[in-house]
Image (cartoon, helix red, strand yellow):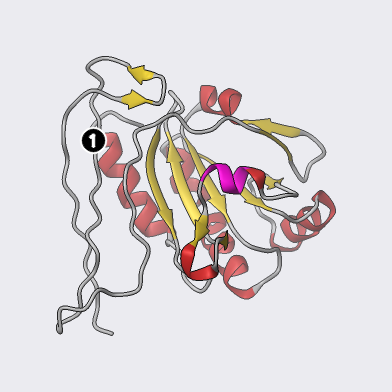
Amino acid sequence: MPNQSVAYTVLQGPSCSPFGCNGPLNEVFFSYYKHMDKGGRVALEGVGTVVGKLAPDFTLPDHLGGSVTLSKAVGKGPVLLVFYPKDFTAVCTKQLCNYSDNIGAFGKMGVQVFGISHNPASSHSQFATTYKFPFPLLTDLRNQVTRDFDATSLLMLGKPSRAVFIISKQRVILYRYVEPTVLTHRSADELLKILQDLRKNNLV
C-alpha cells in the first residue's frame, strides 16, 4: 500500500456536550479523511474525529496502588488516554515505549498520559517496572470504561481495540482515533502534531 496522507480542517464554533452548548468556545474539528490508494480504494485504517462532547467520567485503580478520576485529572491539564489490549504484547509494548520515550514532549505541553487495559494492577506494575513507564497504567477489569468510550472495533467483532483520546481541561474530547485492528497504533509524533495544532487554536 502506498504512503498515506492525512488532511484536516479547522472550524470555529460553539463547543457542545450531551448536556448542551457551552457558549462561543473555539472548537477544532479534525476531519481525518479516509485514506485512498492510487486505485481509489479506501485503506483499512481508523478514522480520527473530534467528538466535541464531554468525556465519560470514571475512576479506575492504577498500578501504583492509587486511583485516577478523570474529572479530577483534567483539572491538572489535558489528558491523553491510551486504550490498549494487553500488557507485554508486542504492539502494546512498542506503542507505550514510544510514548514513554516522548514523555518530555508531552509534558512540555502539559499533557498527562494514562494507559488503560483490562489487566490487573499486578500485571500493570510488572509491565511498568520492566519498561520504566513514567505514566500510570489503569485497570479497566471488565472493559466498562473501554465500552463507554467506544474503544472497540467492528472488525474485531466489538472487542476492545487500540485507541487514543485527547481530552481538554474542560473534559471535552478533542480527538479520538480507534484502530480497526490491534496491529496498528498512532505514533507519538502524530499525536504531538495534533496537540500542536490544538494548541494553536487555544484548546490545550
Left or right: residue 140 compared with residue 30: right
Q: Secondary structure at mark 1?
A: helix
Question: Where does residue 190 sit, x and y in percent of width and height?
Answer: 35, 57
- Looking at the image, residue 93 sits to the left or right of residue 28; the answer is right
In the shown orientation, is residue 136 left or right of residue 77? right
Residue extent of the magenta highlight? 145-149
Q: Nearer the viewer, residue 161 or 87?
A: 161
Residue 98, magenta (yes or no): no
Image quadrant occupied by the N terminus: bottom left
Q: Quadrant of residue 13?
A: top left
Q: Position of residue 179 (x, y in %)?
A: 45, 63
Predominant SS along the magenta part:
helix
Tell me the amino acid under the disc marked 1.
Lys
Report the residue marked by disc 1.
200
Q: Residue at x 69, y 57 (%)?
A: 132
- Taking the spot 24% from the left edge, 40% from the top edge, the residue there is 29
Identify which residue, 190 or 20, lies in the foreground.
20
Report the residue at 22% width, 17% height from top.
24
Q: Residue at x 23, y 50 (%)?
A: 31
- Residue 56 appearing in the image: yes
